[in-house]
Amino acid sequence: MTITKSKEKRLDEVEGQLTPADWAIRLVDEFRKHPSLETFFKESAKASRAEDAPIFHAYSALAEQAESRCPGKKPEDLRARTKLSRDLRTAFHALKLLALEINEDIIKRAEKAGLEAALRLSRLETTILQDAFGRTARKAAGWIEDFKTPDKNDEENRQIMLRELAAYTDVYYGEKFSDSLPLPGGIRLRWPSFIEEWIMSTGGLIAEVFSIQEAVKIVQDKYFGGHPILFLDVEASLDRIIKTLEDSAKTFNEYLTTRGQVFKADWEAEEEEDGFATAIPGEREGKLQISLDRIRARAKQIGKDQAAEWAKTAKTKATYTALDETGEGNTFLWNNIQEEAGVKS
């Protein structure tokens, strides 16, 4: 019994020195012991008292810390103790909200953007495959039209083949005069094709997912001492989405490379003949390739902005909660709204 009391005393002494950030790190470490947010809350609910649950324990410990740091019974001592307690608990609350809301945000946003990007890549590959098949269909139709049949049955089969191929010969995404504008000096000003625009918008979705991963790392390093803050299932989901996008982009780029090798000689011959090739606009210049390195570089800046936005939102919510206890919450919120709107500096 004496040993237990001694351990409890040492634990109280240690907890009495912990900062709000220390408590936040303890909390996210507790997150990592559970497979999901739901499981974490279910386990927390088993505590005999609310203040003993990992999600709440820091508040009572920080309030006790404020009492030990600001002893005394004078009005100024009471005010100092109350302010310190509120400041400590608000700082922890902001970090707790930050970690929890990042997990919730990833569940909502990353999966949606990731699935949409993967679907767009799949559709894009199918579109370009259709272009290749349309090209092959046109060639095959040209040869079959010149083919002389020896009898009526073969002729009937020839006509059936031509009708079947006709369903695909109109599929064409190659370079056309309408894709560009002639300028003096034999120069043509070309604007992006719809496939190039499709790739750019898909790259934007991939960048959004990559930026979430970057933002999480920034938050972990800046506010949680590098400790992971994602629940295991959220982390696994984000990793899976990113790998799917990386694999999809790699497969798409490999297909473009193979396509270029197959059609390169034809494109060059066509360009010599009339200045245009059946290549998709931007294809020969490599503009259809998806550069994950460029997307990641773009995602770094987006991630910085996202991390700052997460932190700002969490701090605002925590501050409002603290001030709401004193009746100042609405004033704080109104001032914040005015600042956001540029009405008040």
Image (tube, helix red, strand yellow):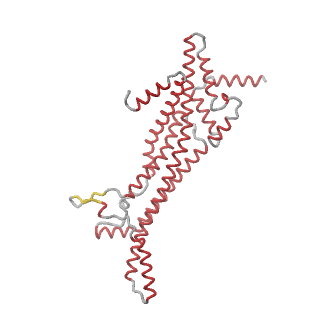
- Residue 68 in percent (x, y) is at 62, 17
Tell which of 140 and 50 is nearer to you.
50
- Residue depicted at x 43% and y 82%: 158
Furthest toward the left, the residue is 184
- Residue 247 in percent (x, y) is at 51, 55
Q: Is residue 175 left or right of residue 1?
A: left
Q: Is residue 178 left or right of residue 11?
A: left
Q: Is residue 196 above or below residue 43?
A: below
Q: Is residue 144 above or below residue 214?
A: below
Q: Is residue 173 above or below residue 313?
A: below
Furthest toward the bottom, the residue is 151
Tell which of 181 and 264 is nearer to you.
181
Figure quadrant of residue 16: top right
Furthest toward the right, the residue is 1
Q: Is residue 165 left or right of residue 237?
A: left
Figure quadrant of residue 179: bottom left
